[in-house]
């Protein structure tokens, strides 16, 4: 029992991935080739270890990307939310200003209309007085 553990420690198994079926394996790097216990295919130990390293690195990388992505997506959403909030506020402000302008415009229009009416009334009255339109 104890010798078995000792020998296992001695073999120093490292994680690897079968080059054929992709199963997770433990291989002895001191050996050149091994046979996959899942698919029975003989593989080069170095390649299987390399496979594992690639997969491991890719998964680690993918995790980082996922974290970065969710962070980016969150910040983009936040940014978009802020943007639309700002836009809404801006539009509200714009509409308020438009209404103000409208009021001013309508006020000015009525002022000019009143002046014009007054002037035309005066012209009409003068015309009436002078008998031009009769
Ligand atoms: Zn395999």
Image (spheres, rainbow, N blue to C red):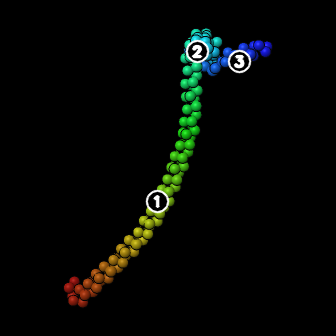
Determine the residue located farthest toward the left in the rendered image: 132
Question: Which comes before the other along the chain, label 1 or label 3?
Answer: 3
Residue 119 location in percent, x, y? 29, 82
Residue nearest the viewer, comparing 125 with 47: 47
Q: Where 134 falls versus 85 (above or below)?
A: below
Residue 71 location in percent, x, y? 56, 43
Q: CA distance from mark 1 to mark 2?
A: 66 Å
- Residue at disc 1, secondary structure: helix
Indicate if the residue with disc 1 has its beta carbon within 8 Å of ligand 1. no
Residue at the spot 66% in from the left edge and 18% down from the top edge:
13
Classify the position of the N terminus by image quarter: top right
Residue assigned mark 2: 45
Residue assigned mark 1: 91
Pointers 1 and 3 in contact (C-beta within 8 Å): no
Question: Which comes before the other along the chain, label 1 or label 2?
Answer: 2
Residue assigned mark 3: 9
Pointers 1 and 2 in contact (C-beta within 8 Å): no
Residue 127 location in percent, x, y? 23, 86
Left or right, 109 with reference to 63: left
């Amino acid at each position: 029992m104890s010798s078995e553990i000792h020998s296992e420690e001695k073999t120093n198994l490292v994680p690897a991935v079968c080059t054929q079926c992709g199963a997770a394996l433990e291989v002895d790097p001191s050996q050149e080739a091994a046979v996959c216990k899942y698919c029975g295919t003989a593989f080069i130990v170095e390649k299987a270890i390399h496979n594992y390293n690639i997969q491991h690195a890719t998964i680690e990388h993918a995790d980082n990307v996922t974290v970065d992505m969710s962070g980016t997506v969150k910040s983009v959403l936040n940014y978009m939310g802020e943007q639309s909030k700002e836009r809404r506020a801006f539009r509200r402000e714009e509409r308020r200003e438009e209404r103000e302008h409208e009021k001013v415009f309508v006020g000015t229009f009525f002022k000019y209309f009143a002046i014009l009416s007054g002037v035309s009334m005066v012209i009409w009255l003068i015309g009436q007085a002078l008998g031009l339109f009769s």
